[in-house]
Image (cartoon, rainbow, N blue to C red):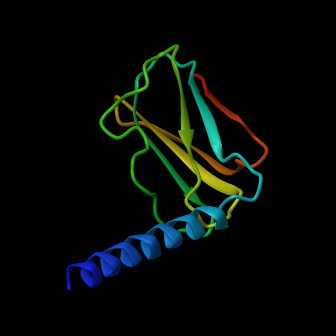
Amino acid sequence: MKTVRRLAILFGVLGLLGGLMTAAAQSRDGYDRHVVVVNNSAYTIRELYAANVDVKQWEEDVLHEGVLLPGHRVRVDIDDGTGHCFYDLKAVFQDGSETIHWGMNVCKAETWTLTN
């Protein structure tokens, strides 16, 4: 009975891993969907959002609990697994003001530089 249970658990884990590998492979089309965000402004960026152009709302803050200080940069993973190349990017500054880059081709563009 223990052997059957162990085999059932093993097959369950293998099935889960296979599903995860398939999902990862579907978004691997040779494009690196990472963008370096450069804060060349005088203001701290407190939130940074990305959403593919077919989504009508912003995804989660890719800075999470962090901020992007003036003069600093961060490399963020934009890939949401959908295979999209075009994304809208939004930066929210410490004072609540924001700027949006509409329709950035993250399959080709590598950097978004923010200035005053």
Quadrant housing residue 77: top right
Compared to 49, does 36 lie above or below? above
The residue depicted at 43 percent of the width and 43 percent of the height is: 62
Quadrant housing residue 67: top left
The residue depicted at 40 percent of the width and 37 percent of the height is: 63
Query: How many numbered markers are drawn?
Result: 0
Compared to 107, does 1 lie above or below? below
Q: Position of residue 18 (x, y in %)?
A: 52, 71
Tell me: 78 left or right of 111. left
Quadrant housing residue 12: bottom left
Quadrant where the N terminus is found in the figure: bottom left
**Of residues 81 and 101, which is closer to you in this image?**
81
The residue depicted at 59 percent of the width and 54 percent of the height is: 79
Q: Position of residue 107 (x, y in %)?
A: 75, 49
Using the rendered image of the protein, determine whether residue 56 is visible from the camera's viewpoint. no
Tell me: 93 left or right of 101. left
Q: Position of residue 104 (x, y in %)?
A: 70, 48
Q: Position of residue 83 (x, y in %)?
A: 67, 64
The residue depicted at 70 percent of the width and 57 percent of the height is: 86
Using the rendered image of the protein, determine whether residue 47 is visible from the camera's viewpoint. yes
**Of residues 93 and 20, which is closer to you in this image?**
20
Quadrant where the C terminus is found in the figure: top right
